[in-house]
Amino acid sequence: MHTIIEPFKIKSVEPLYFNTKKERKTILEKACYNPFRIHADDVLIDLLTDSGTSAMSSNQWAGIMQGDESYAGSPSFFHFEKSVKDVTGMPIVIPTHQGRAAEKILFSILGGKGKYFISNTLFDTTRANIEFSGAEGIDCLCEEGKHPTIPAPFKGNMDIDMLKKIIKKIGAENIPMVIMTVTNNSGGGQPVSMQNIKTVSAICKENNIPFFIDACRFAENSYFIKLREEGYENKSIPEIAAEMFSYADGCTMSAKKDAFANIGGFLAMRDLDLAIHCRNLLIITEGFTTYGGLAGRDLEAIAIGLKEVMDEHYLQYRIRSIEYLTNKLIEAGVPVMQPAGGHAVYIDAKEFLSHIPVEQYPGQALVCALYAEGGIRSVEIGSLMFGKYDISGKLVPAQMELVRLAIPRRVYTQSHIDYVAEVIIQVFKIRNMIKGLEVIEETPLLRHFTAKLKPIN
Ligand code: F0G
């Protein structure tokens, strides 16, 4: 078989910014060892996120010019609404300015003290919005998903037995919703099988609990189902996506991922009563129901991107490029999440930096080392992001200490990725010289965005 190539030509380019290792060390120190605090033009290869960082297509840019900016009833809204309905089959579509705005609306209505939301793994903003409402989030990930370096086809699946036990223990009346994140971002970008979605949906129906999908990466998940699940090899991606959504009562979506948009999101659902509450809150917080915090041009870009992402040549290239980097790292002995996920490569920092205890944030230490060595920006998904303190102030660490290298869609070429692999392998060789970190300033919620740290000598 021939090399799987980027299925696009490049019409417009942006410069990369080069600096020296010495300069980067100073930048890191000034940023208090938190790459969220670094200016993007001090970054060479930015793998902080795949969110809002996609290269849009010439068709999307054409859509931007055609966007209609009417306050109410814009044709761009109807184009957007049709596109979301075509993909999800959901009859009610509510635009929001990004995914977390959809979450904020949903959990403000359904959350509150004494309520529990169950998920395979809640993404950080999803969990934060649940907790902000006074409710609690419970992750119910399958056992395979908890072991980064042991391969399995659907490591994003929910643990069905645990789900049943939790529902029995807490009581269905205290569970306003079960949320399946596809692919499972915080658990390594790992897919969820159709069988698992179907079973969870059936359990929710039996217990009268609404079942929603966090659909940020629905197309990548659909492609994994096509590749790995029996009976789906000859189905098209739109067919697989439609079946996934058919089991759900609704979904939240950040269009900044699998819709190739730089901003945007939506809520889609079947229940008109819930939609009325959501739309009321939307008008107060986001905007009128036909634009929800977005410009008409954004709605056009999303409408077009949602369709483009289901192209199989694109998805083959997308999944292959993540696997390509993963395999290079495996060959060099670097401990990475296996198999490769859909949008990112996840390094197991606990193993990579086994001399740094979790209380000294090995993930964040590795993130800093990758920046210093090669100007690569990545993100910690470990105890800085998800750690809590117990009543005595002792860190309760996260389940895993991962470093995520999220690959923006259609942005970097194979030689950029080769460079990334070289830098990681170089850092792996000098890993024993890397020091742990301590937090010197932080906020109570989502502290990883703004926390200040310093190296421990
Ligand atoms: N759900 C998942 C699974 C996500 O990955 C994200 C965002 C959101 C919800 C929130 O969407 O950013 O549009 O408000 N993830 C980004 C990331 C930020 O880097 O993984 P948003």
Image (cartoon, rainbow, N blue to C red):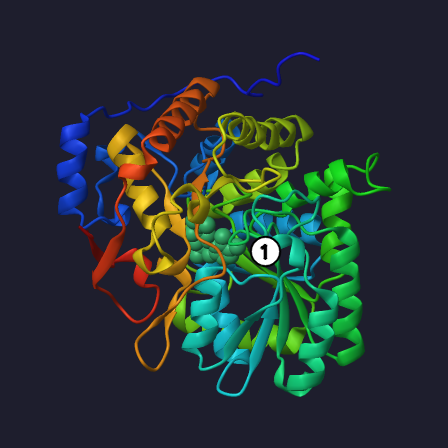
Determine the image quadrant of residue 370: top left
Across and down, in percent, residue 310 comes to 66, 37
- Is residue 93 in view? no
40 with respect to 29 (left or right): right
> What x and y, as percent, mark residue 31?
18, 47
Residue beneath the point at 76% across and 80% down: 207
Q: Position of residue 374 (x, y in %)?
A: 29, 28
Name the amino acid type tagged 1.
Lys
Between 9 and 412, the residue placed more toward the observer is 412
Residue at 51 percent across and 54 percent down: it is 186
Q: Residue furthest top?
A: 2
SS class of the residue under badge 1?
helix
Q: Name the residue: 31% across, 31% down.
A: 430
Of the pair 338 and 44, the residue shown nearer to us? 338
How far across and how far down the image is residue 208, in percent? 74, 79
- Name the residue located 78 percent from the left edge and 72 percent from the top edge: 203
